[in-house]
Amino acid sequence: MSLACRVIPCLDVAAGRVVKGVNFQNLRDMGDPVELARLYFEQGADELTFLDVTATVDARDTTYDVVRRTAEQVFIPLTVGGGVRTADDVARLLAVGADKAGVNSAAIARPALIDEIADRFGAQVLVLSLDVTRSDATASGFVVTTHGGRTETTLDALAWAREAIDRGAGELLVNSIDADGTKEGFDLELVGLMREISHAPVIASGGAGAATDFAPAIRAGADAVLAASVFHSGQLTIGEVKAAMIADGLDVRA
């Protein structure tokens, strides 16, 4: 676990707008990504994650112009995922201001992509995004999905995470589809299992509904906590989340 845990707002973007749903369904408009990125930077976010949630489904590249305009407004690490299929895609993202690239569906289809990105840019640039749902079909009880949670694979989530780390993934973004948008708290069991098998940092995602939900995810093994709808709706600010984490005895970044 890192010395200071990170709080990361997530911008799920479709057609140039931030969207949010429940369990990856019924997406609704939440605002302009550039404006929200600037707001969260000013509130004290440690990093930002930008996910083009329909790029893979639509078989297109991510929205590079939106990424560039976002990067011009914030001066904290920016991770971009969605539609990343090649190492050249990562090069383009870095060129328009991204600091890290997230891969999911393309890496599952062709695991060598992880090696190629890590070999060319270093593990610190590569974030493996795992959209995970519970399943009795795998040994761990969790399976990974692709295409924005629309397609369930037969891959055991823990086994895939181990393989990806061995291939060079520098960080795991672990999103619980079952908890996503429910505001009932993070899936602490999933976070704990990922912590057990990973020497790379683990980002917990999916389910935050109150300021008090974040500290348990860190104590379960996450190095960082990511949320979307509670920030986009104005229900919580970054400062309120950090204050609650400090009150729980955790070290957060200034």
Image: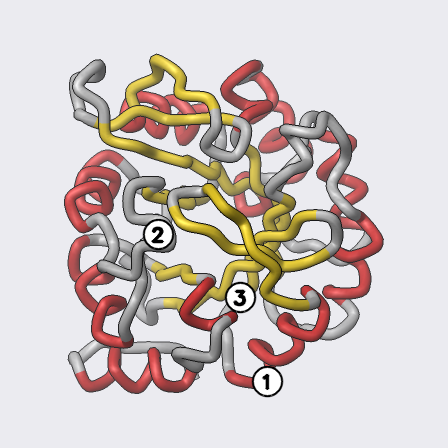
Q: To which quarter of the image does residue 244 belong? A: bottom left
Q: Does residue 208 appear left or right of residue 33 in this picture?
A: left
Picture colour scheme: secondary structure
The three-letter code of the residue at mark 2 reads Gly
Disc 3 designates what residue? 47
User: Considering only vertical position in the picture, is 3 above or below 53?
Assistant: below
Q: Amino acid at mark 3?
A: Glu
Percent x, y of residue 91: 77, 40
Question: Which residue position is annotated with label 2?
Answer: 206
> What residue does disc 1 label?
42
The amino acid marked with disc number 1 is: Glu
Which mark is drawn over residue 60? none
How packed is label 3: few (under 14 Cα within 10 Å), some, or many (20 or more)?
Answer: many
Q: Earlier in the sequence, mark 1 or mark 3?
A: 1
Q: Residue at x 31, y 27 (%)?
A: 157
Q: Decide: few, some or many residues near mark 2? Use Cα within 10 Å; few <14, some 14-19, many ≥20.
A: many
Q: Position of residue 76 (x, y in %)?
A: 61, 70
Q: Mark 3 or mark 2, which has the lower sequence index? A: 3
Mark 3 → mark 2, Cα distance in angstroms? 17 Å
Whether residue 190 is visible to the viewer of this picture, yes or no, is: yes
Q: Name the residue: 46% across, 72% down.
A: 231
- Badge 2 vs badge 1, beta-carbon distance below 8 Å: no
- Distance of label 2 from label 1 (alpha carbons): 23 Å
How dense is the environment of label 1, judged by Cα within 10 Å: few (below 14), some, or many (20 and up)?
A: few
Q: Which one is closest to the eye, mark 3 or mark 2?
A: 2
User: Is disc 3 placed on a helix, strand or loop?
Assistant: loop
